Image: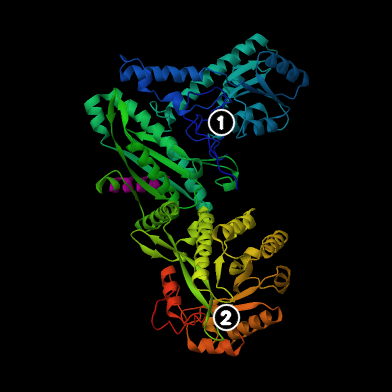
Amino acid sequence: MKRRSYKIHRGTAPVLGTLPKATRAKSVSCREPAELRGEQRSSGRSLQPADIVPVIEATDANCGVRESLKKAGMKLRSRLAGKREAMRVLIADDDLLTRRLLQETLVKAGYEVVVVVDGSKALECLSAKVGAPRVALLDWLMPGLNGLEVCREIRRHSEHPYIYMILLTSRTSKEDIVKGLEAGADDYLTKPFDLEELKARLRCGQRILKLEDKLTYDALHDPLTHLPNRTYFLERLALCVSWGLQHPEYKFAVLSVDMDRFKIVNDSMGNPAGDWLLVQIADRLLGSIRGDDAMIRSSEAGGLTGGRNDGGMLARLGGDKFTILLDNIRDASEGIGVAERIQRNIRRPFVIHKQKVFTSASIGIAFSGTGYSAAEDMLGDANTAMSRAKSLGKARYEMCDPAMHNTATGRFRLENDLRRATEREEFRVHYQPIVSLADSRIVGFEALVRWQRPEFGLVMPAGFIPVAEDTGLILWIGNWVLLEACRQLRAWNRRFPRVPAFTVAVNISAKQFAQPDLVSQIEQMLTVSGLAPQSLKLELTESITMGDEKRTTRILGELKTLGVRLCIDDFGTGYSSLSYLRRFALDILKIDRSFVSDMLNNSESREIVKTILSLGSNLRLEVVAEGVETAEQVNLLQSLGCGYAQGYFFSRALDGTGITNTLLAAKADDYSLTNELSKHPVAL
């Protein structure tokens, strides 16, 4: 999957011809869903944080904070004075000569022109969610819908951006003019019309649209930070809530962020310093939200529309309170990740008049999985959680659902701890003996990874391997285990020589098997460790081998050429196809523990075990039974002709020192095991 990317737009001054009525200003969100947007964006460069945020160090030493803010505003306005789009004008007239005359005149005047021949097509064009014209010249009399009816229909839908509509007609009575204006037209031009008068009326319309856009922008944005305000935020959140009710799989989160001790800055350094600090805080909040946090997601992730225009939002609700909408997230842990980064970034000192100012953030998180039906309720829960964070000591985050909080926090901490574990090499390899059922002698070991997690003790694979696979850390862990097992077995074979030498079985994950250089990696590890290839067994699950049959055949063939032995783990729980056993040139089958544990009491499990053993005998494959825990199971396996087994009946998995002591206690070249189950009654 491609890495998701995003581009954040701050709110800017309105650009003529691009802003809708309800959401007709640029906001912090970019590439918004069509349902949330309904406008054409400016083609100018998007403003970056540096365009707005004043940097005190860059100003003259004698300038105060107020002067810095003034300069920042001048810089912002200069950015907005750049290149803008040509005004798009719709011409709707069924008369060919009139259309051509108007089109030629307006194109020469610098307008972008769209031409249609009837009212229905005019309505369709003006109702477009992207790129709709902002000015329309409508003939009163047209086939189908006439110009008057188009005006009424457009004004009936408030979600459309404001469109300046001029009626073209030969009717000159006052009654007709009043009728047209009451239908929603902004102006009225009688035929035959003067082209210069037409252009003048269009310029007037542009001025009105610019004023309308500015008023709408000011109503929806915070004047200091140019972020969306509470009204705009709730409009967006309401659409997310509505979409979530219709699509249960869609998830989103709201973060309520409140600055701690902000009032001290205002009281001690003045309002201009407080304003400057708020702008800097807004900038750091933007910097805390990354593309893979779903501030903006790409098409691979789906989202409200399932397309490429999904977005979130950063807004300022007033004072020192901000809110963040994370759209189309996977689970609540993504909100936790954003909250953690916000706290780290906000803790860094701000510099005002060469003085360091410190603040922190209290954050409340509300997750859509709780089941909201109103935007105000979700924002209220986020605010409640934020208040609880303040009451519990500030500089922290809380979730509105304690149970979800614990789950999400646990997952987030697990991922972070797991990453640190790879850096600190906190993993341990334990080895479970594999014995011959003929004489109970140890013939080899299976390498099993454990995590020595600080504060938690020894963690079994089920507690971290799924997360390692999700995050890709399984590649590092798998390679580390493989190399460590090869080194350890090499040491044991030198210290405890036997014929044939001990072997070690190491599990290979799906992500490892998918690596293009898998064979060369294993060859390098064998070289570094000095272990003979025939002493290494690689265990793969059936599902791994069934992905790309051609590639699997090639890779397994190369491993066989290298001298490594190949084993199918948990045989009988997957595809269990006879054809792939022949094609893939395997050496060993391992009977899954679920069949072994159940075979004494379940005839079906017993028959499966017998079938696997018969299959192994016919194909000349070794068969190893896993999870053997009782003498009765051993006796049945022996009677069925099973050659090898592992499990608590013989020994639990031991660390390297434990295995060394076990081998030292056995007779040389014998290395037989007695029943270990009674000594170590530890559950898996």
Return the x and y of residue 34 as percentages of the image width and height: 57, 39
Give the extent of the magenta segment.
Answer: 375-388
State the SS at label 2: strand
Image quarter where the C terminus lies is: bottom left
Q: Position of residue 599 (x, y in %)?
A: 55, 85
Q: Which mark is residue 155?
A: 1
| Residue 262 in the image: above or below residue 167 | below
Determine which of the numbered discs, if any, sits on residue 318 in the image. none
Badge 1: how crowded within 10 Å, few (<14), some, or many (20+)?
Answer: some
Closer to the camera in the image, 589 or 67:
589
**Label 1 element class:** helix
Instruction: Answer with left or right where residue 166 lies relative to residue 410.
Output: right
**Does 376 appear in magenta?**
yes
Residue 124 magenta-highlighted: no
Q: Check disc 1 and give the amino acid type.
A: Arg
Q: Is residue 342 above or below residue 329?
A: above
Which tag is nearer the camera, tag 1 or tag 2? 2
Q: In the current view of this chain or complex, which residue is farthest to the right?
A: 96
Query: Mark 2 or mark 1, which is nearer the start of the sequence?
Result: 1
How far is the residue under mark 1 from the one under mark 2? 82 Å
Image coordinates of residue 84 in percent, x first then y, are 57, 20
The residue shown at (50%, 20%) is 80
Describe residue 165's horizontal placement relative to residue 381 as left or right: right
Residue 597: image location, x then y, percent: 51, 82
Mark identifier at residue 644: 2
- 187 or 301, which lies in front? 301
Q: Give the residue drawn at x 53%, y 30%.
A: 20
